[in-house]
Amino acid sequence: MTPYLLTPGPLTTSARTKESMLRDWGSWDGDFNQITARLREGLLRIVHGEGTHECVPLQGSGTFAVEAAIGTLVPRNGHVLVPVNGAYCQRIAKICKVLGRKLTTFEYAEDAQVRPEDIDRLLAKDPSITHVALVHCETSTGILNPLHEIALVAQKHGKGLIVDAMSSFGALEIDARRTPFDAVIAASGKCLEGVPGIGFVLARREALQASEGNCHSLAMDLYDQWVYMGKTTQWRFTPPTHVVAALDSALTQYFEEGGLAARGGAYQRNCKALVEGMAKLGLRSFLPPEIQAPIIVTFHAPDDPKYEFKQFYNAVKARGYILYPGKLTTVETFRVGCMGQLGERGMEGAVEAVRDVLHAMGIRTQAAEAVL
């Protein structure tokens, strides 16, 4: 049995998405170029960015696209403010350092949201800041940061906003008509339920037009990729054709099923079933519900000397579910994703697998005893 992936991506994909990868495509062929065009239009549609923004896809993981967005949209003499409340915020800060962009960070606890009033104060204090780079849903914990409110603050100060929406795009609302941003960045293997291999940047057209010559890299240059695609309908360099076809299929299914409202609603139900089921087993979620995104949930590890993550992980995997290690620096945790195709038993099956493993390992919380 192939286990279900309860991870932050890759995800368990539908049979239809898998089947879409059985055909080979010529990367310069007109039929394949139509797929690319359809994909770019569909991704813009999700954020209502038609007419104001451009979709620029890029080979590689989501981090490739984040680096490309910062390297392309932030001038070499630019200055980026990065509020940090998790590992992926820290990664953006590292990207800025590697690219030689001036950087200011503002640190939060891992269970605290970024506060718009802090961003307002920091931008007022240092007018040399040109951009704010925000993680919408911090995947290391599952915390949801207040994107819309921070976007309005950045707009008030005349600053560009670059949004890592890797774990929110397609499930949580981002509306370009009301939330101003220079770029929203996501990837194929997350909420859209494609397979990994493509990142994409939805960039404000004026910001993209002004970015010529900024980029540190030929391969990562979103401006050059955008111009070339506009002239030729083709990718500059060999695209991951099967991944493109899979994302096209996944996006078609996404819209057929009801788009963002349906996908987000399904993940909300998964998250609720997960948190409530794990609570009955005595496993506490790390975040309070009011700041928990329905994408991935961090749980405190059982406070029992018999608990060891690798053994726990392997035993749950043997029962058909792959979990994810924690990524916190202060407490021992593990993570469970709410995304993807979870089969007929859904999240309840995953909770049952965890319950059985806790019992087999001899880990007996008071709550777990009540449901065994």
Image (cartoon, helix red, strand yellow):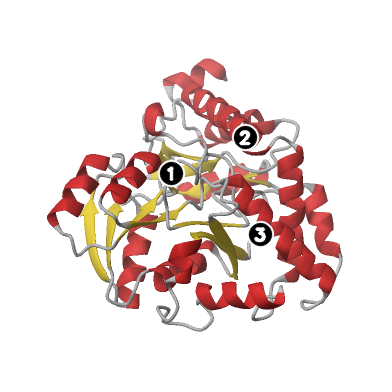
At label 3, counting other C-alpha atoms closer than 10 Å, the crowd grade (few under 14, some 14-19, many 20 or more) is some
Q: Is residue 246 left or right of residue 137?
A: right
Instruction: Kindly identify the amino acid type of the residue bearing the numbered disc 1.
Output: Thr
Residue lying furthest right in this view?
A: 23
- Sequence-wise, the earlier of marks 1 and 2 is 1
Tell whether 326 sits left or right of 76: right
Q: Is residue 91 above or below residue 179?
A: below
Which one is in front in this view, the residue at disc 1 or the one at disc 2?
1
- Disc 3 target residue: 40
The tag on residue 179 is 1
Where residue 25 sits, quadrant-wise, is bottom right
Q: CA distance from mark 1 to mark 3?
A: 20 Å
Amino acid type shown at disc 3: Arg
Give me the residue at 63% from left, 53% from top. Answer: 43
Decide if residue 231 is on the left or right side of residue 72. Answer: right
> Looking at the image, is mark 1 or mark 3 earlier in the sequence?
3
Estimate the x, y position of residue 39 in percent, counting from the top left: 70, 58
Total numbered labels: 3
Tell me what residue is drawn at x 41 percent, y 30 percent. Answer: 284
Can you tell which of label 3 and label 2 is closer to the viewer? Answer: 3
- The picture places residue 153, in percent across and down from the top left corner, at 29, 45
* Residues at circles 1 and 3 in contact by the CB criterion of under 8 Å: no
Q: Residue at x 82, y 58 (%)?
A: 20
Q: Secondary structure at mark 3?
A: helix
Q: Is residue 304 above or below residue 82?
A: above
Toward the viewer: 39 or 100?
39
> The residue under label 2 is which amino acid type?
Ala
Q: Dot 2: few (<14), some (14–19), or many (≥20) neighbours within 10 Å?
A: many
Q: Which residue is mark 2?
A: 350
